[in-house]
Image (cartoon, rainbow, N blue to C red):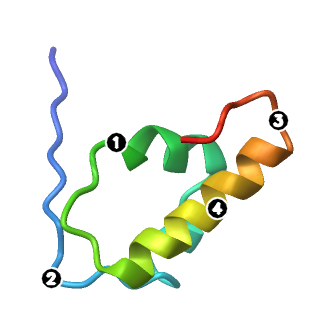
Amino acid sequence: MEITSSFNNPSELNKNDFLSNLNNDCLLHAFSYLDKLSLDNMDCINQRIRQVSSHSSLKQI
């Protein structure tokens, strides 16, 4: 049985409802699939990725 899912970008991502609920590994993985984000949401994601990268062996994206 194959399980598939899709991600539809909502008209506006809510940082508190969406990004804060993602763990760091999920955020890093999902980052490449997100598009058409507002600058505020993109900045929030970049800050989270920098925090993860600075505390691990991961390179900054």
Real-space CA distance between mark 1 and mark 3, rounded to the nearest whole angstrom: 19 Å
Q: Name the residue tied to disc 3.
A: 56
Q: Secondary structure at mark 1?
A: loop
In the image, residue 61 sits, relative to residue 27, either above or below, namely above
Task: Using residue 38 as the reference point, say whether residue 24 is left or right of it.
Answer: right
Task: Using residue 6 as the reference point, say whether residue 42 is left or right of it.
Answer: right
How many numbered badges does the structure rendering display?
4
Q: Secondary structure at mark 3?
A: loop
Crowding at label 4, few (<14), some or many (≥20) Cα neighbours within 10 Å? some
* Amino acid type at mark 1: Ser
The front one of 37 and 20 is 37
* Amino acid type at mark 3: Ser
Name the residue rendered at 40%, 48% in the picture: 31
Q: Name the residue tied to disc 1.
A: 32
Report which quarter residue 50 is drawn in.
bottom right
* Amino acid type at mark 4: Arg
Where residue 3 sits: x, y (%)? 19, 27
Real-space CA distance between mark 4 and mark 2, rounded to the nearest whole angstrom: 22 Å
Q: Quadrant of the N terminus?
A: top left
Q: Name the residue tied to disc 2.
A: 11
Crowding at label 3, few (<14), some or many (≥20) Cα neighbours within 10 Å? few
Q: Name the residue tied to disc 4.
A: 48
Q: Secondary structure at mark 2?
A: loop
